[in-house]
Image (tube, rainbow, N blue to C red):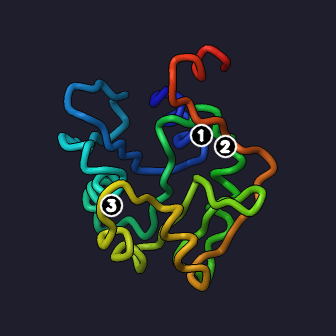
Amino acid sequence: MLQAVVAIAGEAGLHPILAVVPSGLDLPPDVVPVRNDEPARGMSRSLQLGIGALPPEVTAVIVLLGDQPTMPVASVRAVVAARGTHPIVAASADGLALPPVLIERSAFGIVQALTGDIGLREIVRGNPAFVQTVSLETIPQDVDAPTDLELL
């Protein structure tokens, strides 16, 4: 699944591509691994590790989830195209925030303040004045169990 998400990021023109993963997981050679040996600390830890590993010349990050291998490339491109005056650009559908989410470097500190199993959805909901939303027609399916993968 992760390789499908990496392919989506590459097709959308994202560079560099970093993947926050546990030790021992093999990644394609064009992906920078960011090791998270404490995944039990929650989503916030993965987000912080990924943002902390970005090179200084990176001005924004697009966050994609490894369990969404059906994310349309057009959705990623739509979020990137909406960059402007807001430090966060988030996809939305039916009034709900969902990936992909773009975070400008000026907002990286918001992510660094998270703890536990809190992700970007809470940031987007809690800071509406800082967020530009992009409505999507297609909601990518999460693959959280083997039966979800079989359905794909």
**Mark 3 crowd level (few <14, some 14–19, many ≥20, 10 Å Cα):** many
Q: Residue at x 28, y 26 (%)?
A: 25
Residue type (three-letter) at the residue carrying disc 1: Glu
Mark 2–mark 3 distance (CA, rounded to whole Å): 22 Å
Mark 1: secondary structure: helix
**Mark 1 crowd level (few <14, some 14–19, many ≥20, 10 Å Cα):** few
Closer to viewer: mark 1 or mark 3: 3
Q: Do the residues under discs 2 and 1 have CB atoms within 8 angstroms?
A: yes
**Is 83 left, or right, of 51 in this rendering?**
right
In this view, the residue in front, 76 or 39, is 39
Q: Residue at x 37, y 28 (%)?
A: 28
Q: Which residue is mark 2?
A: 73
Q: Return the disc, 2 or 3, that comes first in the chain's sequence.
A: 3
Q: Do the residues under discs 2 and 3 have CB atoms within 8 angstroms?
A: no
Q: Which mark is residue 51?
A: 3
In the image, residue 13 lies at what x, y percent?
56, 48
Residue type (three-letter) at the residue carrying disc 3: Ile
Q: Which residue is mark 1?
A: 11
- The image quadrant that residue 60 belongs to is bottom left
